[in-house]
Image (cartoon, rainbow, N blue to C red):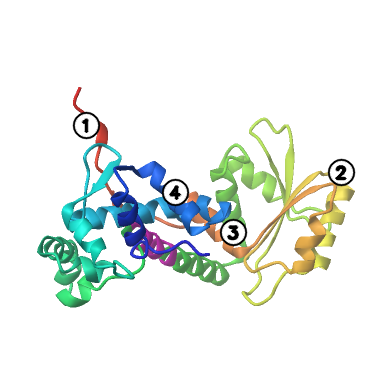
Amino acid sequence: MAIPDYQTLMLPVLQLANEGEQRVADVVDLLADKLGLTEEERQALLPSGRQRVLHNRIHWAKFYLTKAGFLTSPGRGRFSITQAGRELLAENLARVDVSVLMRRPEFREFYRGSAGSSTAEGASTTEAAEPGTRTPEEQIEAAYQTLEATLRADLLDRISKNSPAFFEQLIVDLLVAMGYGGSHRNAAAQLGRSGDGGVDGVINEDRLGLDRVYVQAKRYSAGNAVGRPDVQAFVGSLVGLGASKGVFVTTSTFSAQARDFVKHLSQRVVLLDGESLAGLMIEHGIGVRTNRTVEFRRLDEDFFEET
């Protein structure tokens, strides 16, 4: 089954707390077993790769139940049920979610207060407080992914409108930022040497020039995939040059036949499509700039430990 959202997890978390004081780390495994989650689902990470999805959702289920007064935290990383929590379980509800928690005045004040920034920007209190299925981290990461996808599309659109010389310089800038070529001057000299057949240039893999990578770059429109014949011609050029490594860069995509072809080669050939190219540009700061940096802070549990 899919990993339940954090509201669906509220009742199971409360039921476990009713069995006795619990450790958060133990609850993650207990619920994973109870829900019959696969190993892949247990290990699934948020897009940032910094926290497991299940752990994040259990954390927020516990946090909201605590804010509503149904759970309490007797010690670091531990929680237990309150009398209010036992009374809630006695109602035998099929589901406990934010709408149930909103019965509690302390939770209503917290929940609507936490949406204050949204209300200030024009949303009504009711709209701001309407519960969703994503945790705050998941909402932030989904928004980040949307913004980055838009930026990748914008980058590829702008590349298509610039000259071939600009595209070549972009590849130089990116390769240098990734640690190839030694310097812009050396990289430009290497990449600027038109090669034989399907090779546009060659660049040092390291600053000492112990190995070299051959590069082919094609600026295609979005719907025009690079096929196997183009890639095969590039590989043929590598063989003729006695080269073992090559990178084929395009602003579009590669056909399935082209990708399958390079899997079985003795040479190491990387196919870099438009999405990957734009992603590397963002990662290495090529053609983009930071507009705003937002820091999210967490409670420092160590600070509050008394010895």
Please name which of the two marks, 4 or 2, marks the residue nearer to the observer.
Answer: 4
Q: In terms of sequence position, does the residue under pointer 1 or pointer 3 come before the other?
A: 3
Type of amino acid at the residue the image marks with label 4: Leu
What residue would you read off at disc 1? Answer: 303
Q: Which structural element holds mark 1?
A: helix
Tell me whether circle 4 and circle 2 mark residues in contact (CB < 8 Å): no
Q: In terms of sequence position, does the residue under pointer 1 or pointer 2 come before the other?
A: 2
What residue would you read off at disc 3? Answer: 276
Type of amino acid at the residue the image marks with label 2: Gly
Span highlighted in magenta in the image: 137-146
How many labels sit on residues? 4
> In terms of depth relative to the viewer, which is nearer, 107 or 135?
107
Q: Which structural element holds mark 4?
A: helix
> In terms of depth relative to the viewer, which is nearer, 150 or 173?
150
Q: In terms of sequence position, does the residue under pointer 2 or pointer 3 come before the other?
A: 2
Identified at 15% across, 74% down, the residue is 125
Q: In terms of sequence position, does the residue under pointer 1 or pointer 4 come before the other?
A: 4
Q: Which structural element holds mark 3?
A: helix
Type of amino acid at the residue the image marks with label 1: Phe
Q: Badge 1: how crowded within 10 Å, few (<14), some, or many (20+)? A: few
- Estimate the spatial distance between the alpha carbons at disc 2 and disc 3, rounded to whole Å: 27 Å
Name above or below for residue 232 compared with residue 124.
Answer: above
- Is residue 86 in sight in this rendering? yes
Please name which of the two marks, 4 or 3, marks the residue nearer to the observer.
Answer: 4
Please name which of the two marks, 1 or 2, marks the residue nearer to the observer.
Answer: 1
**The quarter of the displayed image where residue 78 is located:** top left
What residue would you read off at disc 4? Answer: 30
**Image coordinates for residue 272, horizontal then vertical, percent:** 66, 58
**Image coordinates for residue 284, horizontal then vertical, percent:** 49, 49
Q: In terms of sequence position, does the residue under pointer 4 or pointer 2 come before the other?
A: 4
Identified at 11% across, 63% down, the residue is 109
